[in-house]
Image (cartoon, rainbow, N blue to C red):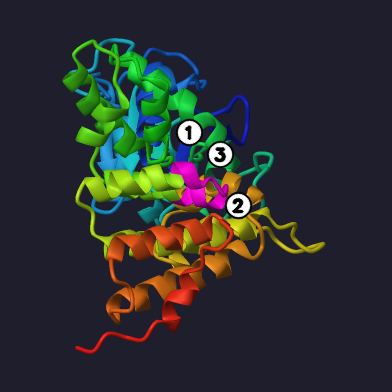
């Protein structure tokens, strides 16, 4: 989703920022083409945009705020390019705008040119998300301390935050992006791709590969397993989801597929532990916050466990159905299984892991912790 601070800017100044780099680039391409053609730049359906490429519009100049001087950026908005077509609108794009320190550039930018600032991180206004344009120009001291979103809003521009896809928007997005490539996905193949999460950059790459491979045929679940990189993570996600839902039939079938593909038991255990750790953090998002307390920030939580906000948000739906005791019980059972295998208490690694899965699914009589009662093998 793209959220904008105003519905119609009074100046052609825009700031694009957020948590989804690929969709931000799609929006940038849409906005630049619209501005170069003299239109207002209103956002459309990003899923329907074919490519994030800016093309070869002669009136577009691109800068990098990390290396290019603010004076050079300002000058490009004031002068007509040598090869610009008569009457063509000038559009100046500044990448990595989070590195821009002289925000007074925004206020001083010529009103007859368009300035598009693109930041690869989420940026918050220093003085509130919604503001009316300031009356008069702020003094030098105020301009030096303003956050970039504030400067854009004060200049009468628009700030657009490109958020990560919500879980309920993921399937329609994948289906629409596949359709752009003339590809159709079987229902189970679509669901499997969705387990990759809201990483739209990766989804785009995998869809390109699958569409080329299918050559017009419907993309199947087997195609996804064969071609999509990191298929084990997707399968372990499905395994963990079946466990949380207490669905032993699906869980054991998924485990059989992982083992048949040659995945090591210890690797599967490690990934299961990781998935339950992410589930634990996702469950925090589902708990009501105390009165007056701020909602937990998925970005900050993700940094704490060296994950991504998308991975945590992907588990929110499952977290709603998980019982409070499920995660501690999963840690206990997986730890017991790991110790039993490494100490030689388990006669067969795969049998120990299957017992653990049945235990996690709540099957009566299946207890991985009981493996620890078996004497350790002498080595």
Q: Residue at x 35, y 14 (%)?
A: 179
**Decide: marks 2, 1 in contact (CB < 8 A)?**
no
Q: Which mark is residue 319?
A: 2
Is residue 109 among the parts visible in the rendering? yes
**Horizontal arrangement in the rendering, residue 169 relative to residue 236 (left or right):** right
Mark 2 and mark 3 lie on one chain; the one further toward the N terminus is: 3
- Give the x, y percent position of residue 210: 23, 25
Q: Dot 3: few (<14), some (14–19), or many (≥20) neighbours within 10 Å? A: many
Q: Which residues are magenta?
A: 240-250
Q: Residue at x 53, y 33 (%)?
A: 1
- Give the x, y percent position of residue 169: 53, 30
The residue that mark 3 highlights is: 155
- Give the x, y percent position of residue 331: 49, 70
Mark 1 and mark 3 lie on one chain; the one further toward the N terminus is: 1
Q: Nearer the viewer, mark 2 or mark 1?
A: 2
Secondary structure type for disc 3: loop
- Give the x, y percent position of residue 320: 65, 49
The residue that mark 1 highlights is: 13
Q: Is residue 137 positioned above or below 185 on the image? A: below
Q: Residue at x 29, y 48 (%)?
A: 258
Mark 2 and mark 1 lie on one chain; the one further toward the N terminus is: 1
Q: Is residue 220 positioned above or below 122 on the image? A: above
Q: Is residue 24 positioned above or below 72 on the image? A: above
Residue toward you, 90 or 141: 90
């Amino acid at each position: 989703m793209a959220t904008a601070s105003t519905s119609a800017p009074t100046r052609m100044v825009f700031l694009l920022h957020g948590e989804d780099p690929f969709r931000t680039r799609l929006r940038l391409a849409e906005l630049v083409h619209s501005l170069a053609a003299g239109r207002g730049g209103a956002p459309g359906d990003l899923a329907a945009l074919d490519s994030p490429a800016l093309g070869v519009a002669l009136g577009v100049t691109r800068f990098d705020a990390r290396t290019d001087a603010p004076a050079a950026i300002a000058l490009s908005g004031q002068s007509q390019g040598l090869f610009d077509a008569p009457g063509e609108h000038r559009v100046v794009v500044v990448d990595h705008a989070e590195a821009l320190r002289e925000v007074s550039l925004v206020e001083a930018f010529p009103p007859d040119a368009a300035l598009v600032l693109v930041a690869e991180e989420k940026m918050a206004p220093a003085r509130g998300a919604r503001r009316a344009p300031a009356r008069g120009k702020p003094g030098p001291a105020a301009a030096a301390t303003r956050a970039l979103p504030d400067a854009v809003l004060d200049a009468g521009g628009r700030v657009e935050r490109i958020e990560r896809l919500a879980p309920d928007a993921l399937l329609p997005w994948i289906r629409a992006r596949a359709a752009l490539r003339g590809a159709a996905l079987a229902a189970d193949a679509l669901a499997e791709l969705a387990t990759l999460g809201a990483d739209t950059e990766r989804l785009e790459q995998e869809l390109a590969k699958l569409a080329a491979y299918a050559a017009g045929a419907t993309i199947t679940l087997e195609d996804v397993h064969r071609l999509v990189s990191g298929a084990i993570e997707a399968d372990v996600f499905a395994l963990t989801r079946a466990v949380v839902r207490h669905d032993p039939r699906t869980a054991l079938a998924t485990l059989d597929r992982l083992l048949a593909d040659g995945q090591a038991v210890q690797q599967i255990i490690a990934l299961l532990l990781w998935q339950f750790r992410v589930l634990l953090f996702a469950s925090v998002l589902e708990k009501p916050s105390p009165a007056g307390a701020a909602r937990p920030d998925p970005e900050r939580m993700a940094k704490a466990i060296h994950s991504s906000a998308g991975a945590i948000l992907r588990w929110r739906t499952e977290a709603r159905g998980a019982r409070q005791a499920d995660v501690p019980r999963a840690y206990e059972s997986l730890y017991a299984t790991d110790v039993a295998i490494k100490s030689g208490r388990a006669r067969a690694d795969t049998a120990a892991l299957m017992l653990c899965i049945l235990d996690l699914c709540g099957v009566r009589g299946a207890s991985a912790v009981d493996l620890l009662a078996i004497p350790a093998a002498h080595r």
